[in-house]
Image: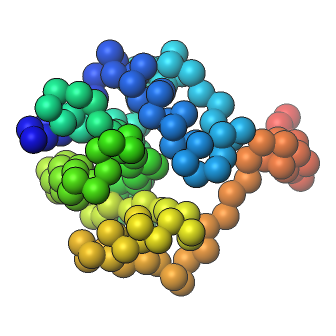
Amino acid sequence: MKVTIRQAVPEDADAIYTMISELSVYEHARQDAATSVASIRDALFGPGSNNDAFICEIDEAIAGYAVTSSSYSTWLDRRGLSMEDMYFTPPYRDRDVGQAMLHYIAQHAVKCRCSRLEWGTLSWNQTARAFYLSIGALPLDEWVRYRLDGATLLRFAESGLLKNA
């Protein structure tokens, strides 16, 4: 089995789109995936993009992807990486390629002088949680993530006390 992990290129947008669709089904959130090949191409490879994408190929077939974005730690005064997704299509799971992909991204973070690499997983995904613990990653139990999105984000943004003059 030949495993290759590389930086994604714009021509990978179709494959990334397909895997995002598969991931949305896997995470029981198909209705939440509101993307397109064109928007992926722009977000990942367009001018001013703050994102990176990585592709894992097994025997020259695309097996998985990961997407990261830049973050900044005020306390450490250094850039960090936030991993949004790491996904492998079902035939390529349980082949130790997740560890290879994460290792590649960690090397990328070190090369870019990042202070940390962070990501999340759903609480019910015991397979992912066990994997992350097995490589030495620690859950941040003291932090609670919050989100404003969709209509709630719009409503909150429009209700602000400060109005543009």
Q: Residue at x 33, y 42 (%)?
A: 91
Q: Residue at x 41, y 67 (%)?
A: 127
Residue 113, quarter of the rendered image:
bottom left
Residue 75 visible, this angle: no
- Horizontally, residue 96 falls left or right of residue 148, namely left
Residue 135 sits above or below residue 18 on the image: below
Residue at the bottom extreme? Answer: 142
| Image quadrant in which the C terminus is located | top right
Q: Residue at x 51, y 82 (%)?
A: 141
Place of residue 158 in the rendered image (x, y in percent of width and height, measured from the top left):
87, 42
Residue 8 sits above or below residue 152 on the image: above
Residue 118, quarter of the rendered image:
bottom left
- Horizontally, residue 67 falls left or right of residue 22, namely left
- Horizontally, residue 109 falls left or right of residue 10, namely left
| Image quadrant in which the N terminus is located | top left
Q: Residue at x 61, y 67 (%)?
A: 145
Place of residue 108 in the rendered image (x, y in percent of width and height, measured from the top left):
19, 48
Residue 132, quarter of the rendered image:
bottom left
Residue 126 visible, this angle: yes
